Image (cartoon, rainbow, N blue to C red):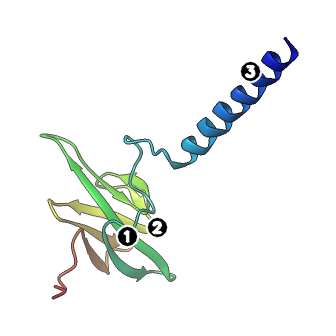
Amino acid sequence: MVKKIIFIIIANAILISNAVAQEQFLRDPTAPIAKSGVGHNLGTIGDNVKIQLQAILTTNSIKKAIINGNTYRVGDDCEGMIVLQINKTNVVLTSLDGKEKTTIGLFSNKVNN
């Protein structure tokens, strides 16, 4: 009887440790693709702020951009810049005073052979 109880305890410990180990590698498929390396890295804007466009989401009436893991709409403040336009493959940002414009693309213009 004691051997049976010890076996059950050990088996449960192994199953629980397996579940915990697997949970560390599972990713929520609905989570934004933040920090995954996807998107074109523009480099820096403003006060050396790194910015990366990771996705553009559009429906008939709504346009959203995921930049540095955060979701933005036209008119939102993004890293000290204002989102001016969200297009199919890029986002246009403008400085708060409107004097400076920056375009971030989903894809790099550079082709690797």
Around disc 2, counting alpha carbons within 10 Å, would you say few (fewer than 14), some (14 to 19), or many (20 or more)? some
| Residue at numbered disc 3 | 8
Residue, far right = 2
SS assignment at label 3: helix
SS assignment at label 2: loop
Residue, far top = 1
How far apart, in angstroms, are the residues tagged by discs 3 and 1? 50 Å
Depth check, mark 3 against mark 1: the one in front is: 3
Question: On the rendered structure, is 18 left or right of 92?
Answer: right
Around disc 1, counting alpha carbons within 10 Å, would you say few (fewer than 14), some (14 to 19), or many (20 or more)? many
Q: Which residue is drawn at the image coordinates 19% and 86% (left, top)? A: 112
Number of numbered discs present? Answer: 3
How far apart, in angstroms, are the residues tagged by discs 2 and 1? 11 Å
Does the image show residue 96? no
- Location of residue 108 with respect to 34 vertically, above or below: below
Horizontal and vertical percent position of residue 107? 21, 72
SS assignment at label 1: strand
Point out the tag, 2 or 3, that comes first from the N-terminus: 3
Does the image show residue 62? yes
Horizontal and vertical percent position of residue 88? 14, 59
